[in-house]
Amino acid sequence: MEDLIRQAFLHVEVIGPHVAEGHYDLVGPNGEIILPQVWETMIEPDWVITMHMWPMPEPPPPPPEPPAEAVAEAVIDVPPADSAVAPPPPPPPPGAAPPKKKIVKQTGFLAWTAGKPKNPKSGKARRKPEGKGGDAVVQVPEVIV
């Protein structure tokens, strides 16, 4: 019987090699596993035999890619000598103070988007009248259903 099963799965790509190695169980109608050694003495006419494959092993993971440093090649783009690109400015002489950065005061819309509070001296800020601060009271009409 084993030879017949092997011949039946000989040309099946995925599970054929596993069947040839005997990675399956033959299960009888009562759920018992039938060993190949006792096949001839155990099987009876009109039995339905089921073949259960063993779990397939996980495929091996793909090999890791080499590090990017080993794969990357250094490519330097050197423009021709007669190109119209100006060379970078020369570095400042040693001991010279670095140039001071110009401080720009943000006003108007940009200051507002940056979260800067309003200028209290500005005439545009609204002030609450004295003695009338607090929560507003809203009267809701009663609805009868």
Image (cartoon, rainbow, N blue to C red):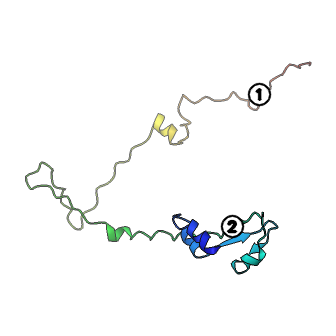
Horizontally, is 3 left or right of 49 in the view? left
Q: Residue furthest front?
A: 45
What is the three-letter code of the residue carrying label 1?
Ala
Task: Mark 2 or mark 1: name the one nearer the start of the chain.
Answer: 2
Quarter of the image holding residue 79? bottom left
What is the three-letter code of the residue carrying label 2?
His
Q: Is residue 108 visible?
A: no
Residue shown at 82% from the left, 67% from the top: 30
Q: CA distance from mark 2 to mark 1?
A: 77 Å
Q: Is residue 29 visible?
A: yes
Return the residue nearer the eye: 32 or 61: 32
Q: Residue furthest left?
A: 82
Name the residue that disc number 1 marks: 136
Quarter of the image holding residue 16? bottom right
Residue shown at 34% from the left, 48% from the top: 102
Residue shown at 79% from the left, 65% from the top: 29
Q: Residue 32's spot in the image, x, y percent?
A: 79, 72
